[in-house]
Image (tube, rainbow, N blue to C red):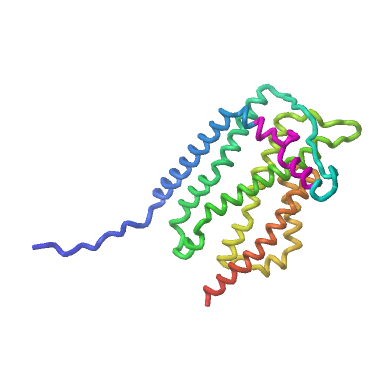
Amino acid sequence: MSKPDQPQVSKEKEMSFFDHIDELRGHIMRSVIVTAVIAALVFAFGDWIFTHFIFGPRNANFPSYRFMCWASGAMGMGDKLCMTPPEFTFDTRELGETFFVHIRTSIVLGLAVAFPFVFREVWLFIKPGLLENESKSAKGVVGVASTLFLLGVLFGYFIVAPFAIKFLVGYDLAGVTNNTPTLASYVNYIIIFLIPTGIVFQLPLVVFYLSRMGLVSADFMRDYRRQAFLSIIILAAIITPPDVVTQFLIAVPIYGLYEVSIFIAEKQYAKYQKGLE
């Protein structure tokens, strides 16, 4: 006599707390391994990376300087807008400073290059907990976040870095020159120009999802424009060196992203309201 059909057990059974911890550990380990491999490669090719990338804004042939000269000539202004990098040498004041700067730079660049993979691992951990409509609305989030991060890094490297370095190194006070900065201080500023800017450029993506969930509307963002502008100025002062030029170079594009985010919020909040009908 055949047994009655047993009800099939769902393969997508609810995971226990320890299952989640184990899965999270896997995502973290993969992210750490990829970051470590990239950091090791950066360390191995340190001479080339420092010469052509980290020290790039010191070179007169840096693309930003060449573009300014080209733009100056194209607008019929001769060489009035031409920029040349300041001449300066590095000083190391602590034993092992060069080595530790090399290590720190390798880790930071490893994290920056691995950002798409790390973000993807975070997304793969979060995605199973989303509803079907939430998962569909988040389609392509890894690509968008990675693109925005890359745009922020490029902006910080090609726009903020050359102007800020020229200003900071060329700034004199009571006969005190600043033409021998430490290697650590220079590299720290380069990192500040790159990583925080890449993170701040995620603003449109954040607003996209907040408005899609009905938490932020375009009217709300318009009403708080002044407060947002003041907050952006404060944020620029926090993540940049204490000079007006660099803060301005950071604050203007962030505010531009805020205005773009208003347009995004208007479209996505309308979809949220439509879904409530």
Residue 131, magenta (yes or no)? no
The residue lying furthest to the left in this view is 1
Quadrant holding the N terminus: bottom left
Please give the name of the residue rendered at 55% of the width and 65% of the height, measured from the top-left corner: 213
Q: Could you tell me residue 113's position as x and y percent?
A: 56, 41
Q: Going by the image, does 215 lie left or right of 4?
A: right
Q: Could you tell me residue 159's position as x and y percent?
A: 72, 45
Figure check: 244 above or below 134: above
| Residue 84 position by quadrant | top right
Q: Could you tell me residue 99's position as x and y percent?
A: 63, 25
The residue lying furthest to the bottom in this view is 277
Please give the name of the residue rendered at 74% of the width and 29% of the height, measured from the top-left corner: 182
- Name the foreground residue: 53 vs 187: 53
Figure check: 268 above or below 235: below
Please give the name of the residue rendered at 45% of the width and 63% of the height, measured from the top-left corner: 131
Q: Going by the image, does 164 lie left or right of 34?
A: right
- Name the foreground residue: 270 vs 53: 53
Please give the name of the residue rendered at 70% of the width and 61% of the height, measured from the top-left corner: 259
Q: Going by the image, does 87 lie left or right of 6?
A: right
The residue lying furthest to the right in this view is 174
| Residue 26 position by quadrant | top left
How many labels sit on residues? 0
Dominant SS of magenta comes to helix
Residue 66, magenta (yes or no)? yes
Q: Going by the image, does 168 lie left or right of 183?
A: right
What range of the chain is rendered magenta?
50-71
Q: Could you tell me residue 193's position as x and y percent?
A: 69, 42
